Image (cartoon, coloured by chain):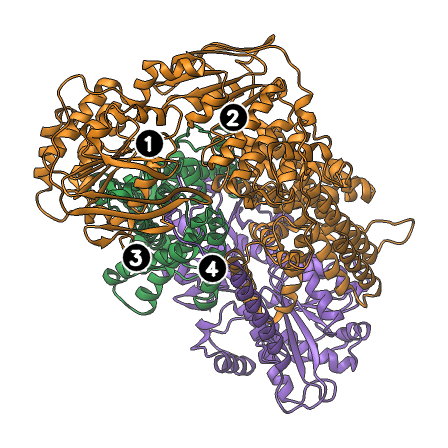
């Protein structure tokens, strides 16, 4: 930082010197324009660089500042300083007004709003001749008087340079201040920002106001340096060029604003003889910059600046960090009969739970049971339709998520939501400041910037077990550290209730053990902890009470031991064997291998899900892969159809290596997946869905096969002209299977077909699968409902945290108590 | 839902950055080399007859943007004149004239910047102006501050030459909107017999300036302006505005617009099937008006010019026409776009050369005075005798205007 | 005056809608779009002008060639300018297509020239009288073509298998791929289709609006506005929004004067987005955490 400041001061001194010795007004003019454009770039950088709202209409704010200042100086004869301040305020006001519609939109919609704004301002300037002088504009704008000196261009330019330097410095200060981090936090993840106490709307509006104010201020200087203003200077092209300058220089960097301004102003001076090509050059530069150097030129210099020295949290973690120790609330959280529905589906239906301080309540249940929705209801992300949530004397029903955070409820998210562009420490700092951001002007002055990492934050980081550098950018963290940092951040807001959504997912055994200890320790300090988890071992080990949900309802509530033995829970997880016809069949003779998987390893981004997995499926078999949630079953199927790239391993299908087949040619090669969640095309009707199933087929039998499908599934025939989105869950599942069959598969993959189906539908589903099997179809079935799957399967594999731990004849596994252990805690002995 | 077909990414950022830097460096050095070796297309050098140090004159006009044609036409007029002057030994005892051109992008801000640069860095002795009146008006303070003469060759706003500066450094060989407006209203009254006129003006400073002129002269000729309608370049349907003028009882329409918008206006007139005389400023000559409006429709407009390259030419005219055709590979007068700019610029450059020879100095103060003492000059548009006086900085007046109309793709004088 | 205002508003509005359809088609299937559509209106007009008028190729050949060239350029844009960003999840395709539009316009200025040229057409020479008002036959043809295109697209998406595959890819790209639908190729084709639509619009308006390098810029911005307020999820919504926008502009210009066209038009855009952030006919998504 010191180096940057010195560099900046040198440049500043050079600029001042250049201004003082400039031989003629032309050079003064160029210097003045560089200064003015730098100020605009800083302004735009705040909005686009920090706050992530790309504006293609900033010429509008520039114009408002220029005209307001000019009118005040010309018509009302205000002093320059006052006029400039007023101009900045006017522009800021416009920025706030524009942020109204702009806040609710993003991406192309936001671009449209800003473009429209810019064009409207330009046209109004042209039309409102009485005020703005129309096309002719306002001329004869006086230079500011300076300490009684004669106004001249040189003084104005000097002033502009000083202001430009100050604005660049201010930007750097802002970036290091909590406000700068708040801007980026809201940009990175508005939902997480709200969860730690920020008000995303307020922050975004501030960004607009600040950006507009600076740009408006630049506008006044522009008017003074040139001597007049006219609508020509404030066109759509100008807005695009401003953005180009910022991107070329380096979005979100202080130096970048200056570099971009230099290029924007000085490059045309070199291209005098190529004026025809000027805009072309700029267009090309923009394109190249976006493609090849998206971080801009300033990022090249960042390689030279030494990175901040690594700071690690305390070597010996405290027993309880101050954040956690401070909290001694005594009242329980009472959830009474809450419910919410989306569309016609009751995501949560009549759930009740009371959590005492110092205890851990776990919420478990199959996929889609409504666990995360319940958490969302508690944290205020959704409002309950029925029932109540009570904490002490507060009813949480009507409160927003920020108000709930205020009351002391903190959460983590299923997909870890960190502020990816901020460092670990800054992630926590944002939570530390929360809603007490203070005046943004203080940020510009650099008041309140923490020089050293706060000890309390270091404490909490070491408490959760984070051992790395606190200045690491969150995006670069290894997976387990992301989890830990998220928990640490949740603790910083001094919660009395901590909601954890699947914190152990994807962790190794050792990490899970440490996590369990951590959660236990947090609870023992007096917090109430509510935990969603799939790892039964973890749940049973640390929970004081367990709530089991299925299809939105609570089906069991009690201590871990009670719940483990509750037959309803077992049924919800494993399913029940079919009461009616026997679905199993005799052992069949071994056939040729259809699918052979060897040492498959893969995952998502940095998270490894499958390790060295091997299995085979032979012709005519029904093979099932069972395992608890999060074991990796769906990942396996996705990687087989090449929807997910494989990290290592070999897969052979019908003798061909599978990796050479692109994803959309899989169906044609005979490998057909019926995906998790049915995934019918809701917009299209049943017949179209079926037709698309046979999309790759060239043969003439498609219509015949379609008729056959409708025969096989009479309910589909009844509903054949209905949009697939209107079918019931069971019908959609039938449709998904029929669609898969239309592709004439050599191997049919089924991903959790029983998910979300009512029990009687599940049995008829399995009856269908059994008859398919009997007809000779080769099937690889993945399902949570182990009981039924084992009943119809010939062979089975047991998947646990990404590895096959057991394989063999399915008949041997039925009624094996060890299987239920895997699902409900306890590992399998080899 | 964003569809991201999976793709194994390889870290290539560093590579891309280097490529980018190399590209920038390459481009930058290309530009630098081009400048140094002087292969720059837009500065024209004189012939080899003259051997002294080049005398630089500047042109600030619209080279890019919607009015780019005007800049080109002015440049051509100047260059043909420069070729002649340099072939005859240049000015001030053997110095060839060198034209330095800057693009004002029709923007006053850029014009002012260019003026500063040309005067202070390139050291031009005088500056020729372009089409846009606001640009010229904006440049006036700078030109007067730096005591450099301005020679307008197109921009017709009254305030350019009739300004508050004393001494006045702005001269013009072009029409003066105020005078043109008087001319047109008189024509409307006397030749088309109208006592009520409607104004159809392009929505830009030129239109604005003419509105002022029309409103000043209408009462002088006992003509009532029943409506003032504005329209934009790019509008394809102006029938609403024209309809209003029709219902207000306009008997003749006065049009101020360039070729493309003027053509749209005439087409809109077709929609109303309103057979009304249309009298126009010279804007519609700056483009292929008959092609854009249709030949039959184009015929219906009577408009003003300072010069026409069609028909009988004087010896000067023949010479200039031949030079233009040869130098710019033109087939005939129909290919001379925006002839106004070319003709005005040609005469203006010759007058400038005469002023330089009279002044025998490039000092602005002296040069300015010289404009009042020019010898007679047989020019393209007319013979100039004492074109500039302290009270009048416009070389052309009402007597120099001619009324013309389109015939096919030719411009012919109106029989009056 | 009203019927004439509405008629001419519908004519230009259906052009906005036609170009806006291009935005909608690509956005539906890939969440990206080509913001240089306006430039492609110009490219279509310019190429057709060069073929038909400058080089004398008969219209019956010039039109399909122009469409094919525009489509080909669209494929190139998708592959080299949009896909590299979309793949990374970056929003920079927005700015790079804008940059492309600037480049295209300037290249046209350097090659086609800065002049405005007329495109003679028998449909734009004399007017016919409808409701006491003169209309060029082309101004009737334009909305008819717009409507026919909308109907044609509707038939494509609702009656052909490939059209349904396209809709499947829009709704659920992952599943579509599993079914064997080549989603990446469809995205590329959608870009080709959208630029072809823009080129078609350019050829249609050339006789009335005249051909110039800058003819498409403002039209492109307005078509973009149309697509946005129509809500990017529904082709009919976009078409209706286009016609509405054209009519609003026309009335504003007729009642208040020429320049209010843009002021009122864009104010309406901001107002619509303030009230319905997903456009008039767009779908709101339920947030999931």
Q: Is residue A289 above or below residue C27?
A: below
* Alpha carbons under labels 2 and 4: distance apart: 54 Å
Give A588 or B133, whichever is nearer the viewer: A588
Q: Is residue A820 left or right of residue C107?
A: left
Label 3: chain letter: C
Q: Which mark is residue C67?
A: 3
For chain A, the rendered hue is: orange
Q: Residues within 10 Å of mark 3 (few under 14, many from 20)?
A: many
Q: Quadrant of residue B42?
A: bottom right
Q: Which residue is mark 2?
A: A500
The answer to whether residue A200 of the structure is visible from this angle is no
Residues flagged by tags 4 and 1 on a common chain? no
**Callouts 3 and 4 in the same chain:** yes
Q: Relative to residue A193, is residue B216 depicted above or below?
A: below
**Residue found at x 34% / y 58%:** C70
Mark 2 neighbour density, 10 Å: few (under 14) some (14–19) many (20 or more)? many
Q: Chain of mark 2?
A: A
- Considering depth in this image, is A726 or A235 the residue closer to the camera? A726
Q: Which circle marks residue A627 in the picture?
A: 1
Real-space CA distance between mark 3 and mark 1, rounded to the nearest whole angstrom:
55 Å
Vertical order, C93 against B64 (above or below): above
The total number of labels drawn is 4
In the figure, the shade used to draw chain B is purple
Which of the 4 quarters of the picture holds residue C287?
Answer: top left
Q: State which mark lies toward you, 2 or 3.
A: 2
> What is the secondary structure assignment of the residue under circle 3?
helix
Neighbor class of circle 1 (other Cα within 10 Å; few <14, some 14-19, many 20+) is many
What residue did someone put label 4 on?
A: C105
Q: Which chain is green?
A: C
Taking the spot 83% from the left edge, 55% from the top edge, the residue there is: A155
């Amino acid at each position: 930082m010191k180096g940057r400041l010195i560099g900046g001061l040198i440049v500043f001194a050079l600029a001042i010197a250049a201004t003082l010795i400039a031989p003629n007004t032309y050079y003064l003019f160029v210097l003045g324009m560089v200064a003015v454009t730098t100020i605009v770039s800083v302004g735009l950088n705040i909005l686009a660089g920090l706050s992530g709202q790309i504006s293609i209409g900033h010429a509008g704010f520039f114009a408002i500042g220029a005209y307001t200042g000019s009118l005040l100086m010309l018509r009302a004869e205000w002093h320059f300083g006052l006029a400039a301040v007023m101009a900045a305020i006017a522009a800021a006001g416009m920025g706030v007004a524009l942020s109204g519609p702009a806040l609710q939109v993003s991406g192309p919609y936001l671009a449209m709003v800003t473009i429209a704004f810019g064009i409207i301002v330009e046209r109004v300037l042209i039309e409102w001749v009485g005020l703005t002088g129309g096309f002719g504009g306002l001329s004869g704008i006086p230079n500011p008087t300076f300490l009684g000196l004669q106004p001249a261009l040189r003084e104005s330019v000097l002033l502009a340079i000083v202001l430009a330097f100050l604005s660049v410095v201010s930007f750097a200060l802002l970036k290091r201040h909590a406000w700068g981090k708040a801007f980026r936090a809201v940009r990175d993840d508005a939902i997480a920002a709200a969860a730690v106490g920020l008000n995303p709307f307020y922050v975004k509006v501030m960004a607009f106001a600040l950006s507009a104010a600076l740009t408006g201020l630049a506008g006044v200087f522009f008017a003074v340096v040139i001597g007049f203003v006219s609508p020509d200077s404030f066109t759509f092209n100008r807005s695009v060029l401003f953005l180009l300058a910022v991107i070329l220089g380096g979005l979100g960097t202080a130096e970048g604003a200056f570099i971009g301004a230099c290029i924007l102003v000085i490059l045309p001076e070199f291209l005098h003889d190529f004026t025809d090509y000027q805009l072309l050059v700029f267009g090309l530069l923009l394109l190249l910059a976006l493609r090849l150097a998206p971080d801009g030129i300033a990022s090249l210099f960042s390689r030279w600046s030494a990175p901040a020295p690594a700071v690690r949290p305390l070597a010996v973690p405290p027993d309880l960090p101050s954040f956690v120790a401070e909290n001694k609330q005594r009242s329980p959280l009472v959830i009474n009969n809450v419910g919410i529905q989306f569309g016609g589906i009751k995501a949560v239906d009549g759930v009740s739970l009371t959590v005492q301080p110092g205890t851990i309540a776990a919420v478990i249940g199959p996929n889609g049971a409504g666990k995360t929705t319940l958490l969302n209801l508690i944290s205020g992300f959704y409002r309950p339709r029925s029932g109540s949530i009570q904490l002490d004397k507060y009813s949480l029903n009507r409160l927003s998520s920020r108000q709930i955070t205020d009351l002391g409820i903190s959460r983590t998210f299923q997909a870890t939501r960190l502020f990816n562009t901020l460092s670990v420490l800054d992630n926590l700092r944002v939570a530390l400041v929360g809603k007490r951001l203070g005046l943004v002007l203080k940020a510009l002055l650099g008041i309140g910037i923490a020089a050293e990492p706060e000890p309390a934050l270091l404490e909490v980081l070491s408490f959760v077990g984070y051992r790395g550098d606190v200045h690491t950018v969150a995006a670069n963290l290894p997976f387990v550290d992301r989890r830990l940092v998220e928990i640490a951040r949740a603790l910083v807001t001094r919660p009395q209730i901590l909601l954890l959504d699947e914190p152990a997912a994807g962790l190794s055994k050792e990490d899970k053990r440490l996590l369990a200890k951590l959660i236990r320790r947090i609870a023992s300090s007096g917090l109430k902890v509510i935990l969603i988890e799939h790892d039964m071992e973890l749940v049973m080990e640390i929970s004081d009470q367990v709530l089991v949900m299925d299809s939105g309802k609570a089906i069991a509530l009690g201590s871990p031991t009670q719940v483990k033995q509750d037959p309803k829970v077992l049924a919800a997880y494993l399913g029940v064997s079919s009461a009616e016809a026997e679905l199993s069949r005799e052992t069949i003779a071994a056939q040729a291998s259809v699918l052979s998987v060897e040492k498959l390893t893969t995952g998502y981004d940095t998270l490894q899900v499958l390790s060295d997995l091997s299995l085979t499926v032979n012709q005519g078999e029904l093979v099932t892969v069972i395992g608890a949630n999060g074991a990796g079953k769906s990942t396996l199927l996705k990687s087989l159809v090449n929807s997910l790239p494989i990290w290592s391993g070999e897969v052979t299908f019908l003798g061909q290596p599978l990796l050479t087949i692109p994803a959309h040619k899989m169906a044609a090669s005979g490998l057909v997946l019926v995906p998790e969640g049915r995934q019918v095309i809701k917009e299209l009707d049943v017949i179209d869905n079926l037709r698309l199933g046979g999309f790759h087929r060239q043969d003439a039998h498609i219509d015949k096969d379609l008729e056959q499908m409708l025969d096989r599934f009479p309910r589909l025939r009844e509903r054949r002209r209905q949009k697939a989105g209107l079918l019931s869950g069971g019908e959609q599942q039938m449709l998904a299977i029929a669609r898969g069959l239309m592709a004439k598969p050599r191997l049919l993959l089924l991903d959790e077909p029983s998910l979300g189906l009512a029990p009687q539908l599940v049995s008829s589903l399995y009856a269908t699968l059994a008859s398919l099997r009997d007809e000779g179809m080769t099937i690889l079935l993945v399902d949570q409902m182990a009981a039924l799957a084992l009943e119809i399967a010939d062979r089975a594999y047991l998947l646990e945290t990404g590895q096959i731990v057991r394989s063999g004849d399915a008949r041997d596994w039925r009624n094996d108590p060890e299987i239920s252990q895997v699902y409900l805690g306890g590992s399998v002995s080899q | 839902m964003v569809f991201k077909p999976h793709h194994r990414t390889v870290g290539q950022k560093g590579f891309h950055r280097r490529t980018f830097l190399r590209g920038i460096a390459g481009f930058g050095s290309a530009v630098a080399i081009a400048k140094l070796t002087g292969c720059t297309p837009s500065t024209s050098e004189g012939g080899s007859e003259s051997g002294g140090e080049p005398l630089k004159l500047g042109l600030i006009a619209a080279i890019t943007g919607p009015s780019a044609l005007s800049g080109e036409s002015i440049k051509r007029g100047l260059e043909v004149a420069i070729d002649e002057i340099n072939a005859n030994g240049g000015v001030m005892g053997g110095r060839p004239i060198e034209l330095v051109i800057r693009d004002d992008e029709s923007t006053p801000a850029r014009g002012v910047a260019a003026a500063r640069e040309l005067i202070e860095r390139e050291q031009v002795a005088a500056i020729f102006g372009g089409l846009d009146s606001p640009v010229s008006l904006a440049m006036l303070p700078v030109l007067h501050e730096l005591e450099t003469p301005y020679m307008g060759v197109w921009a017709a706003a009254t305030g350019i030459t009739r300004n508050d500066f004393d001494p006045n450094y702005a001269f013009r060989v072009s029409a003066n909107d105020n005078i043109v407006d008087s001319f047109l209203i008189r024509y409307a009254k006397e030749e088309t017999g109208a006592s009520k006129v409607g104004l159809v003006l392009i929505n830009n400073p030129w239109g604005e300036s003419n509105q002022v002129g029309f409103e000043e002269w209408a009462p002088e000729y006992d003509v009532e302006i029943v409506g003032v309608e504005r329209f934009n370049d790019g509008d394809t349907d102006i029938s609403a505005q024209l309809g209003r003028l029709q219902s207000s009882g306009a008997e003749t329409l006065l049009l101020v617009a360039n070729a493309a918008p003027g053509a749209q206006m005439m087409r809109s007139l077709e929609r109303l099937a309103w057979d009304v005389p249309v009298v126009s400023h010279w804007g519609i000559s700056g483009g292929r008006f008959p092609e854009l409006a249709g030949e039959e429709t184009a015929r219906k407009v009577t408009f003003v010019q300072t010069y026409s390259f069609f028909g009988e030419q004087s010896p000067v005219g023949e010479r200039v026409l031949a030079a233009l055709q040869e130098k710019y590979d033109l087939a005939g007068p129909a290919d001379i776009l925006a002839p106004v700019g070319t003709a005005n610029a040609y005469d203006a450059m010759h007058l400038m050369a005469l002023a330089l020879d009279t002044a025998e100095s490039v000092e602005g103060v002296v040069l300015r005075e010289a404009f009042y003492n020019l010898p007679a000059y047989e020019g393209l548009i007319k013979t100039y005798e004492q074109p500039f006086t302290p009270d009048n900085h416009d070389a052309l007046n009402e007597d120099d205007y001619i009324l013309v109309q389109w015939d096919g793709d030719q411009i012919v004088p109106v029989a009056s | 005056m009203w019927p004439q205002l509405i008629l001419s508003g519908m004519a230009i509005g259906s052009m906005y809608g036609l170009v806006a359809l291009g935005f909608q088609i690509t956005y539906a299937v890939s969440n990206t779009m080509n913001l240089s559509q306006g430039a492609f209106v110009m490219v279509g007009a310019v190429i057709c002008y060069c073929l038909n008028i400058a080089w004398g190729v008969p219209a019956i050949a010039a039109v399909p060639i122009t469409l094919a060239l525009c489509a080909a350029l669209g494929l190139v844009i998708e592959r080299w300018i949009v896909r590299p960003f979309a793949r990374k999840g970056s929003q920079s395709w927005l700015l790079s297509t804008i940059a492309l539009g600037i480049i295209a316009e300037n290249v046209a200025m350097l090659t086609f020239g800065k002049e405005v040229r007329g495109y003679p057409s028998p449909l734009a020479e004399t007017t016919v009288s409808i409701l006491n008002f003169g209309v060029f036959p082309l101004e009737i043809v334009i909305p008819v073509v717009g409507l026919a295109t909308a109907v044609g697209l509707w038939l494509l998406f609702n009656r052909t298998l490939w059209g349904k595959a396209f809709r499947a890819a829009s709704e659920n790209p992952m599943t579509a791929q599993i079914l064997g639908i080549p989603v990446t190729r469809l995205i590329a084709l959608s870009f080709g289709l959208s630029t072809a639509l823009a080129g078609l619009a350019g050829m249609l308006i050339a006789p009335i609006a005249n051909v110039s390098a800058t003819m498409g810029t403002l039209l492109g911005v307005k078509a973009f506005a149309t697509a946005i307020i129509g809500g990017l999820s529904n082709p009919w919504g976009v078409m209706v929004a286009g016609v509405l926008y054209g009519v609003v502009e026309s009335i504003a210009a007729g009642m208040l004067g020429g320049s209010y066209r843009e002021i009122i038009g864009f104010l309406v855009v901001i107002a619509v987005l303030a009230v319905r952030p997903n456009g008039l006919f767009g779908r709101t998504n339920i947030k999931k955490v």
